[in-house]
Amino acid sequence: MKSNYRLFIGVVAGVLIGAVGNHAIHGQQAKTPPVYVISEADAVTDPAAIKEYGAKVNETLAPFSGHYHFVVRSGKAESLDGDAPPKGIVVIVFDSAEQAHTWYSSPAYAAIKPIRLAAVKGRMFIVDGLAE
């Protein structure tokens, strides 16, 4: 009976040690940092068109796990250094650069991209996020 008890205690201790080790290993694994697509608008030349674009762009992001991180469309912006700040900034978050590029090249986005290009003078670019 004592040997069964010792065996049971040994098995439980082994399972607990394994669980703690597994948790520690997973805690050390680095999470892949996000990728940001940033769009800066220096001038909106067609407000109605950009409103149409804004209403359609969200549905193009969903298949690629993209979502708006924040949007600054108006309000007070103050330049601390350099040129005047852009009139608008949009930041979209993706899990990877591959997802961002796939979204940008997708047929759904290709259908509305000309609206943005015609209605806004600015730029769009991809930036790698930092690991936590």
Image: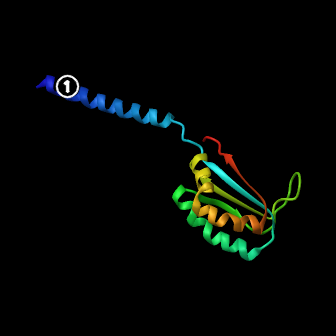
- Please tell me which residue is depicted at 20% across the width and 29% down the height of the picture: 8
Report the front residue among 4 and 129: 129
Total labels drawn: 1
Q: Nearer the viewer, residue 74 or 132?
A: 74
The kind of residue tagged 1 is Leu
The C terminus is located in which quarter?
top right
Q: Is 108 situated left or right of 73 in this image?
A: left
In this picture, is 26 found above or below 48?
above
**Which of the 4 image quarters holds residue 106?**
bottom right
Q: Residue furthest bottom?
A: 48
In the image, taking residue 10 as reference, residue 19 lies left or right, namely right
Image color mode: rainbow
SS type, badge 1? helix
- Residue 101 versus residue 52 in the image, above or below: above
Compare residues 107 and 65 and report the one nearer the observer.
107
**Above or below for 20 versus 41:** above
Q: Is residue 77 left or right of residue 130?
A: right
Residue at the left extreme of this rendering: 1
Tell me the quarter of the picture where residue 5 sits.
top left
Q: Position of residue 12 (x, y in %)?
A: 26, 31
Residue 94, position in %: x, y? 59, 52
Residue at image point 35% right, 29% down: 17
| Residue 114 shown left or right of residue 65 in the figure | right
Give percent across and percent down for residue 84: 87, 59
Which residue corresponds to mark 1?
7
Seen as rendered, the residue at the extreme top is 3
- Mark 1 closeness class: few <14, some 14–19, many ≥20 residues within 10 Å: few
Quick check: 27 above or below 50? above
- Position of the N terminus by quadrant: top left
Residue sitting at x 65%, y 45%: 129
